[in-house]
Image: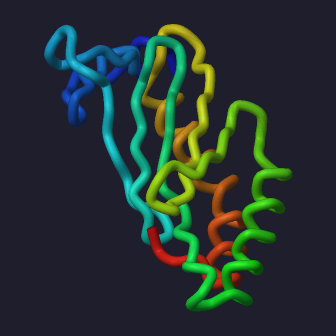
Amino acid sequence: MTAAALSLCPFDLGPFHVGPDGVLSPCVPGTRLAFHFRWHHRVFHAELRGQLLWIAARIAGLPFGLEQPSVRSRVLAALQAVRAALAPGWRMALPPGARVLLEAEVELDRPATARQLVAEVARFAWQVTPCLELLEECGAIAP
């Protein structure tokens, strides 16, 4: 099969225009190439920032110490385990509001294609699943 036989009809996918070769560009020049998806009852935000794919979500809430001290200590221990296991390019933070934020950045080949974008988002979801399951088992509050 030739490369010409594998080309696509151009189409729009949310804020993205997908060219015949799968290359992504903004539908409206100058707009953010961003979208969100749900995974394990959490909303993940994704944005194409040049050559980087940025993904972020609030992954857990901390129970207040006075209400459930044993649950809080289990959640904190789980968060330490998650932090120790983070992949390169991933960061975890606790901004005001006691909701743990996970951010990841993945460098994409240039030019970025729809196939790359979908593959990296799926890979991220697959890699983050054990962390989310551990937090849920320990009693972390839904974000």
Looking at this rendering, what residue extends furthest in the left direction?
A: 28
In the image, taking residue 68 as reference, residue 114 lies left or right, namely left
Q: How is the image coloured?
A: rainbow
Horizontal side of 107 relative to 52 (left or right) equals right
State the residue at coordinates (52%, 42%).
121
Q: Position of residue 15 (x, y in %)?
A: 22, 29
Q: Is residue 91 above or below residue 21?
A: below
Q: Is residue 72 left or right of residue 38?
A: right
Q: Position of residue 16 (x, y in %)?
A: 26, 25
**In this view of the protein, which residue sits in the foreground, 63 or 114?**
63
Q: Nearer the viewer, residue 34 or 24?
A: 34
Q: Is residue 133 above or below residue 88?
A: below
| Front-most of residues 104 and 81 | 81
Residue at 73 percent of width and 89 percent of height: 70
Q: Is residue 110 left or right of residue 34?
A: right
Residue for point 35% across, 18% down: 24
**Residue 98 in the image, given as x and y percentages of width and height:** 52, 62
Q: Is residue 88 above or below residue 132?
A: above
Which x, y percent locates residue 143? 45, 67
Question: How many marks can you see?
Answer: 0
Q: Which one is nearer the viewer's eye here, 36 or 69? A: 69
Residue at 55% across, 48% down: 122
